[in-house]
Image (cartoon, coloured by chain):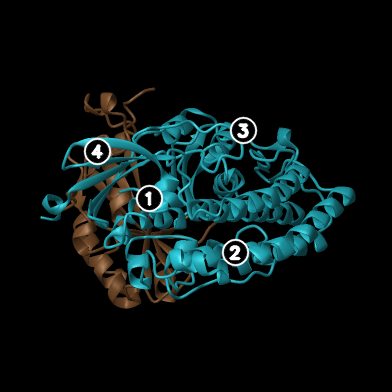
Chain colours: A brown, B cyan
Amino acid sequence: MSVELKKLGLDFLEKYALKVSLMRSNDRIVVEIKPEDLPNVIKSLIEKFGERGVLLSTIAGVDLPDEDSIMINYFINLINLKRYIVLRTKLNRDNPRIKSLLSLGINGALSGECETYDLLGIVFDGNKYLKRGFFVPMDVAEKGIYPLRKEFKV
Amino acid sequence: MTETRADKVVEFPMLVEVPIGPQHPAVHEPIMLKVYVDGEEVVKVEINTGYNHRGVEKLAERNTFYKNIFLCGRVCGICNTVHANCYVRALEAILNVDPPPRAKYLRVLAMELERIHSHMIINAIMAEILGFDTLFMYIMRDRELVMKAKEILTGARVLADYMMVGGVRRDLNEVKRDRIKDILRKLEPRVKYYMKVFEEDATIRKRLVDIGTITSRDAVNHGLLGPTLRGSGIASDARDYDRYDAYGEVPFRLIVRKHGDSHDRMMVRWEETINSIEMCNYVLDHLPQGNAVPDERRLPRRFPEGEAYATAEAPRGELTYYVISKGGDKPYRVKIRTPSFNNIINSGFVYLGHTLADVPVILVSFDPCISCMERVIVTDLRNGVRRKVPIRTLARGEVK
């Protein structure tokens, strides 16, 4: 799969990649990295493609109680390449924390980080706008419930 | 701090009003913008959300994959076809199903008709916000033609429920095809006329040009999408980079403008409307033969393990669906990211330095689709008086 990275000129990511895969049937390259490497990976992407070439499109958190972790995916649109890259990392489920991309100057992370914190409880260190009740009704938020955690049943 | 200098606080909308009628401009996403002004100048904007979070993603985990097609179609009233399409394509990626060419063309037709009426409605609303009620009426009248075309194609003028895994729900015969072509023939000169009005009218230009300017760097950095991104000079369109359905075959122009102001955003929408009419005509003229409607009984009930990330260019920008299947008949996770989610929440910086009357104009230029924008509350901090005023009064600068 590192061939795929090379083909797109992304071979500089290899040193961070724990695993590289392709999503079935569409050509999204998924690069699994350590949470602490995220700022460096983002910085190197911006260095390579420029500020106008890297658009953070979606942040998607997924609760994985079977693995005792929470997966977080950053879907990044590499505008010049017309391709997506997915940065994936797994966090400890008891205390999910990761560095906020706002502190790296990626302001597009605001909406996704606020939502992911409110729905899944992932803390983004450095994001001062995180608050409960961003989307979740306050009566639910006050009980300390994160609705997208699997133990929360509707 | 800027807050201490402010002597007037404008909060809108404090009143959440439920829109009634299918042609109401906004059917979802109630939101509150707290705008802090110093005199007329906006010094701070807070964007508060959470008034209408319906828990669709959680609900989607309880429904079957197929039921969710209808749920996803109801995330947004105006762009329901695009939502259903994006979700369905994520399912098709997991199932490894490729719809027949005719179905792909018909999907493009439905989605482009939707883009036409969505772009027309936001331009109509912009006209209304600026005080051109007659122009609003005219555009809305002609938009009704598109709604009819959509009804001919899908069976419903608003909520189409047209998408199916492996195809579409209804085929198109010759008679219907000719009726849609006839409608498009009537529509095209009208749209060209409205575009000319927006391009040339001195008052419209005065209210839109150089208002809410976003540089290309800021647009990308804040994750802005769709006409807002393209209006700032960034050539990015999901139809171009993902070429889903028949977008790889139906010719289209990637419309980009450079200045990044409210006027450019609206003009991108008009140009795209004209381009969408051309695309619809192309689809109707080049519709491949064959079956477009799959046999629902033959679709697999249980899904294999897998994940897919689908994108679609909704009228407001790139819409994304991330679906995870762990086997079985229900999804493990469905993540929906609508374009307004980025465009509205991340765009607070654009208002700063503009006057109060520009706030509605800038907000509408993002095509926000928010139902409770009808009123604002103006709080005068000097004497603590709160007044409710219609947004139009605010836009016309009549609030003192």
Crowdedness of circle 3 by 10 Å Cα count: few (<14), some, many (20+)? few
Say which residue label 1 marks: B398
Q: Position of residue A126 (x, y in %)?
A: 15, 53
Residue identified by numbered label 4: A121
| Residue B344 pos. (x, y %) | 38, 51
User: The residue marked by circle 2 belongs to what chain?
Assistant: B
- Amino acid under label 2? Trp
Question: Which of pointers 2 and 1 lies earlier in the amino acid sequence?
Answer: 2
Q: Secondary structure at mark 1?
A: loop
Check disc 3 and report the residue beneath it.
B301
Mark in the foreground, 3 or 4: 4
C-alpha gap between disc 3 and disc 4: 33 Å
Image quadrant assignment for residue B378: top left
Amino acid beneath label 3: Arg
User: In front: B316, or B42?
Assistant: B42
In the rendered view of the protein, which quadrant contains the C terminus of chain A?
top left
Residue in the picture at 71% in, 61% down: B190
Q: Amino acid at mark 4?
A: Gly
Between B272 and A36, the one lying in front of the other is: B272
Query: What subunit carries mark 4?
Result: A
Mark 4 vs mark 1, CA separation in Å: 44 Å
